[in-house]
Image (cartoon, rainbow, N blue to C red):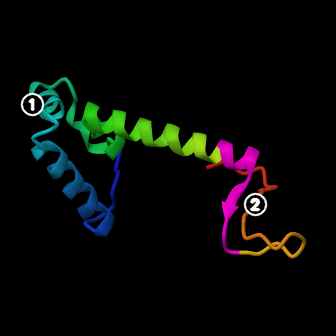
Amino acid sequence: LQVHKGTGDKYKAALRSRVFNLRDKKNPALRENVLTGAVKPEKFAVMTSEEMASDEVRQMRDKFNKAALLEHQMSMQQGTPSGMFTCGKVWKEELHLHSTTNTFI
């Protein structure tokens, strides 16, 4: 399995990411797992940044994702408040924009 062909920018970025994650003092579990063989070199070579992240970073990402999802759901139900436009009917700047698309982030 060849992940990166050659030594281009993607390869260099992936290598920097792995070095950074191994050196991260807040992520000793990854370093220990690689050194003890709990994570095989083949697996480590193809791990994503999410998989290499420390538990603290994973929890923070989950928290942000849940907050973003909740905010998105609320804006779909209540509309997004905006002060950019003035309603010609009531001359107020407080409008609630509603999305009519069915796309999800």
Label 1: which residue? 35
Q: Amino acid at mark 2?
A: Leu
Q: Give neighbour class at mark 1: few <14, some 14-19, many 20+ (Cα, 10 Å).
A: few
Classify 45 as above or below 56: below
Residue 63, position as x, y percentages in the image: 43, 37
Residue 100, position as x, y percentages in the image: 82, 55
Label 2: which residue? 97
Magenta run includes residue 81: yes
The quadrant where residue 12 appears? bottom left
User: Which residue is drawn at the image coordinates 20% and 49% (left, top)?
Assistant: 18
User: Which residue is drawn at the image coordinates 25% and 38% (left, top)?
Assistant: 44
Q: Amino acid at mark 1?
A: Leu
The quadrant where residue 97 appears? bottom right
Magenta run includes residue 23: no
User: Which residue is drawn at the image coordinates 35% and 41% (left, top)?
Assistant: 50
Q: CA distance from mark 1 to mark 2?
A: 53 Å
Classify 75 as above or below 86: above
Tell me where the magenta segment starts and ends, as one range.
Answer: 73-84
Which is more N-terminal, label 2 or label 1?
1
User: Which residue is drawn at the image coordinates 58% and 42% (left, top)?
Assistant: 69
| Pick the front one: 40 or 70 | 70
Q: Residue furthest right?
A: 89
Which image quarter holds the N terminus?
top left
Left or right, residue 50 beside residue 29? right
Left or right, residue 69 beside residue 85? left
| Pick the front one: 13 or 27 | 27
Classify 74 as above or below 30: below
Residue 85, position as x, y percentages in the image: 73, 75
Whether tag 1 and tag 2 are in contact, CB under 8 A, the answer is no
